[in-house]
Image (tube, rainbow, N blue to C red):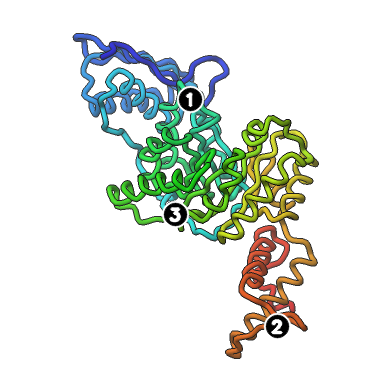
């Protein structure tokens, strides 16, 4: 057992976070040294929270230093719990914030995933306002954006955020670590109504099945009823070759994504905006996804200052079959949505297909045609998605049928 441990961040540039240091003593009770600019307003509530956690974790004698930089309660809880567990690694109890009512929503396999915004798992300052930018999904990242020494910290921050932060209806995603470490991550997120698990650097169906098996056990243990979907990320030459095996390996897979930073590194080539070096990989991922009946999601565009480059990248991705794009900055979301929006020609065609299908259904006609062309189920589904995108981008209104 250690006698002293710390967790969190400190310094002049830190915001919406805190640093907590716990030193055990033989006697003297709990001594709290709180340094915070908001102490006049929130000092008492912070100290009460710390005392309640001391009681929960059965800490009776300790000196506790708190350097607060505007941390929300869910952050203070995570930092304190981690400091305790760095002293007592055998402790399994969790001090959980209340699950807010806004976080009870479920997701669907067919949900639109045009944009997904990555947030580093150990940077809570980005969390409270992320949903206001209206991404389709928000990824709380436990993998590449988190230093190895802070993996334990990120797990607790992400767990608490899933319970305490309002993401305003965005799909709540978590990118776990590469397996086998990622299996351990699941117990920190699955019980807290995560919607989608991203499986990084996926190279076989066995990896998906390992994730699925662990999630099945957690769903049973915690009586979870909302669905949990999977998005494997293809990031290597081997993953590309096995992309269909991966995409078709489990009914809970909702999408297949490609990650080009690691893929081009695996090839030993430089990643370019033109993307010639990755066209094969992207085409394989698209074809694998379509063959498996799931969505194909493109990689991130890494230059957050180049909006024109991002727009061109999304338009090109849409043209070859991708349905979504990764975002690493909120300013990219609007550009992605606009670039993926249907054109006027696409909207008019979709209207005709949908209305023809609906008229045929009313008349009990099994075969649907538009002019001289037959309309089958995939075409109707694509038309419905086009209408949905047009509505989301406010290009048509809900009563569009009245204007035909």
Looking at the rendered structure, the secondary structure element under dot 3 is loop
- 116 in relation to 46, above or below: below
Residue of label 3: 105
On the image, which quarter does residue 96 sit in? top left
Give the farthest residue toward the bottom: 363
- 354 in relation to 328, above or below: below
**What's the CA distance linking mark 2 and mark 1?**
60 Å
Q: Residue visible at 69% across and 50% down? A: 283
Residue of label 2: 369
- 36 in relation to 231, above or below: above
N-term mark: 2 or 3: 3
Residue 21 in the image: state x and y as whole percent: 37, 15
On the image, which quarter does residue 86 sit in? top left
- 275 in relation to 19, above or below: below
- Mark nearest the camera among 3 and 1 is 3
- Mark nearest the camera among 2 and 1 is 2
Looking at the rendered structure, the secondary structure element under dot 2 is strand
N-term mark: 3 or 1: 1
């Amino acid at each position: 057992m250690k006698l002293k441990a710390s967790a969190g961040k400190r310094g002049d540039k830190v915001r919406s976070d805190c640093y907590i240091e716990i030193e055990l003593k033989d006697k003297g009770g709990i001594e709290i040294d709180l340094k915070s600019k908001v102490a006049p307003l929130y000092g008492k509530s912070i100290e009460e929270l710390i005392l309640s956690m001391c009681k929960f974790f059965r800490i009776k004698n300790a000196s506790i230093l708190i350097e607060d930089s505007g941390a929300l309660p869910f952050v203070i809880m995570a930092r304190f719990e981690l400091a305790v567990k760095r002293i007592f690694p055998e402790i399994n109890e969790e001090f959980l914030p209340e699950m807010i009512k806004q976080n009870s929503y479920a997701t669907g396999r067919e949900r639109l995933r045009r944009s997904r915004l990555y947030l580093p798992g150990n940077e809570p300052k980005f969390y409270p306002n992320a949903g206001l930018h209206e991404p389709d999904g928000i990824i709380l990242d436990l993998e590449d954006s988190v230093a190895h020494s802070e993996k334990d910290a990120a797990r607790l921050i992400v767990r608490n955020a899933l319970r305490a932060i309002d993401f305003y209806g965005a799909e709540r995603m978590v990118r776990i670590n590469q397996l086998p470490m990622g299996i351990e991550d699941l117990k920190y997120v699955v019980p807290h109504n995560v919607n989608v698990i991203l499986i990084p650097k996926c190279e076989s169906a066995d990896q998906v099945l390992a994730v699925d098996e662990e999630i099945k056990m957690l769903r049973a243990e915690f009586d979870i009823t909302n669905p949990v979907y999977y998005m494997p990320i293809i990031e290597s030459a081997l993953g590309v070759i096995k992309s269909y095996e991966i995409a078709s390996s489990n009914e809970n897979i909702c999408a297949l994504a490609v990650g080009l930073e690691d893929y081009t590194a695996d090839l030993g080539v430089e990643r370019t905006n033109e993307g010639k070096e990755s066209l094969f990989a992207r085409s394989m991922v698209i074809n694998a996804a379509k063959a498996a009946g799931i969505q194909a999601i493109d990689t991130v565009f890494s230059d957050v200052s180049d909006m024109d480059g991002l727009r061109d990248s999304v338009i090109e991705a849409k043209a070859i079959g991708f349905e979504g794009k990764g975002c690493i900055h909120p300013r990219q979301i609007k550009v992605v949505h606009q670039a993926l929006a249907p054109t006027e020609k696409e909207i008019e065609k979709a209207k005709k297909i949908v209305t023809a299908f609906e008229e045929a259904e009313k008349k009990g006609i099994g075969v649907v045609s538009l002019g001289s062309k037959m309309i089958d189920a995939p075409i109707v589904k694509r038309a419905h998605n086009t209408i949905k995108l047009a509505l989301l981008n406010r290009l048509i209104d809900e009563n569009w049928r009245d204007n035909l």
